[in-house]
Amino acid sequence: MSPSELLRSRIVDVLDFPTPGVVFKDISPLLADHDAFSAAVDAVVAHHVDHGVDKVVGIEARGFILAAPAAYRLGAGFVPVRKPGKLPGPTHETAYALEYGQNVLQVHRDAFSPGDRVLVVDDVLATGGTAAAAARLVQAAGAEVVGFSVLLELGFLSGSAALAAEHPGIPVHALLAY
Ligand code: AMP
């Protein structure tokens, strides 16, 4: 089995979760399988090892799981982008629209050194709103986003195009496309 076949075999579709009509991509079986989890982290690292990454941003919550080992392996720092009320220090925050209502994300204002090269990591790229918001926070904090990396991209939701519209020229790397 190729690495991508292994990853695909460990992602489970859960119908109507968390709300009716959504097909949730559950990565729990992948995370629980050492071979699959390490293949995923290795692939993120291999793709970005020569990109001069100073910090890896993980987006709460599943983004943390991939971003932290990738940061360790890349010799970079890890920075969490979190939901409101979780970070104790002064923050930048940004809101973005969901189908119903909105989400807010925050990052510590002092999370980056000026000019840090930052890789933004999450599990799933759907509409791209979450990743775009994380990139706004990185830029507001004075750093440069040099790439987006996701385990899987839901191509039919055009997240890559949405990211390119708001953050042109920043590459999106997806290990799997659906
Ligand atoms: P979006 O902002 O639309 O790109 O949504 C991406 C965020 O929502 C990521 O943090 C994902 O964890 C989560 N997400 C969206 N759609 C799904 C899905 N079908 N399965 C699992 N997670 C999802």
Image (tube, rainbow, N blue to C red):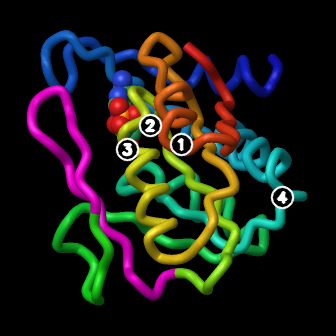
Disc 2 marks which residue? 28
Kindly identify the amino acid type of the residue bearing the numbered disc 1.
Leu
Callout 2 crowding tier (Cα within 10 Å): few <14, some 14–19, many ≥20: few
Q: Nearer the viewer, residue 144 or 24?
A: 144
Q: Nearer the viewer, residue 173 or 113?
A: 113
- For marks 3 and 2 on the same chain, the one whose residue lies earlier in the sequence: 2
Q: Are marks 1 and 2 in contact (CB under 8 Å)?
A: yes
Picture layout, residue 41 above or below residue 115:
above
Residue 62 image point, x, y percent: 42, 49
Disc 4 marks which residue? 51
Q: Residue at x 37, y 44 (%)?
A: 130
Residue 73 image point, x, y percent: 77, 65
Residue 123 image point, x, y percent: 49, 40
Tell me the distance, in whole angstroms, between the alpha carbons under discs 3 and 2: 20 Å
Picture quarter with the C terminus = top right
- For marks 1 and 3 on the same chain, the one whose residue lies earlier in the sequence: 1
